[in-house]
Image (cartoon, rainbow, N blue to C red):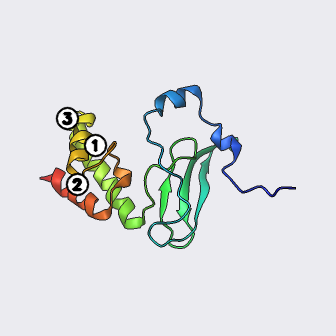
């Protein structure tokens, strides 16, 4: 008898409704992390929010060794970015706040993200979840001037 590898539960993979598929089709599916790029530790998947029926509403990948983590998109499978320690997560949130303020003030979000993709030399779409600490600090300085 074959021994089954532990994987993300099937009910998590099936949670996408037709609406979710339409809303999330623009998401670039980043690879599922197996090892932490910060400490080379093992990464595990865990759910941390469930509704009253036990359906996972939010999940994350977390490094067992250093505690770096990244949340997943709705459905619990694909990460929103790269693993990040506490300081990097704080910087990413601050970066989002700065960009949201600029977007709500006077510019379209697509224009802002295209400009940032050029500035940071991104090949594909720009994602704050892919930025390093230095890049987040640079973005905050750039947009606060």
- The first of marks 3 and 2 along the sequence is 3
> Measuring 26% from the left and 59% from the top, which residue is drawn there?
135
- 101 on left or right of 11: left
The circle on residue 72 is: none
Q: Quadrant of residue 130?
A: bottom left
Residue holding disc 1: 100
Q: CA distance from mark 3 to mark 2?
A: 16 Å
As displayed, is residue 88 above or below residue 81?
Answer: below
> Measuring 24% from the left and 38% from the top, which residue is drawn there?
103
Where is residue 10 shown, x and y percent of the image? 70, 43
Tally of numbered tags: 3
Q: Name the quarter where the N terminus is drawn.
A: bottom right
- The first of marks 1 and 3 along the sequence is 1
Q: CA distance from mark 1 to mark 3?
A: 10 Å
**Residue closer to the observer: 96 or 114:** 114
Sort mark 1 into few (<14), some (14-19) or many (20+) by Cα contacts within 10 Å. Answer: some
Where is residue 141 shown, x and y percent of the image? 17, 57
Q: Secondary structure at mark 3?
A: loop
Residue holding disc 2: 139
- 125 on left or right of 137: right
- 76 on left or right of 28: right
Could you tell me if the residues under marks 1 and 3 are in contact, i.e. CB atoms within 8 Å? no
Residue holding disc 3: 107
Sort mark 3 into few (<14), some (14-19) or many (20+) by Cα contacts within 10 Å. Answer: few
């Amino acid at each position: 008898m074959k021994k089954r590898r532990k994987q993300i539960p099937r009910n998590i993979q099936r949670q996408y409704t037709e609406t979710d598929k339409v809303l999330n089709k623009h998401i670039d599916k980043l690879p599922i992390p197996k090892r932490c790029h910060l400490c080379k530790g093992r990464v595990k998947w865990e759910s941390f929010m469930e509704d009253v029926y036990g359906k996972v509403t939010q999940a994350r990948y977390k490094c067992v060794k250093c505690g770096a983590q990244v949340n997943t998109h709705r459905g619990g499978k694909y990460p929103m970015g790269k693993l990040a320690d506490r300081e990097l997560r704080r910087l990413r949130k601050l970066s989002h706040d700065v960009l949201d303020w600029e977007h709500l003030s006077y510019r379209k979000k697509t224009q802002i993200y295209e400009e940032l993709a050029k500035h940071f030399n991104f090949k594909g779409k720009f994602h704050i979840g892919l930025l390093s600490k230095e890049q987040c600090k640079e973005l905050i300085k750039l947009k606060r001037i």
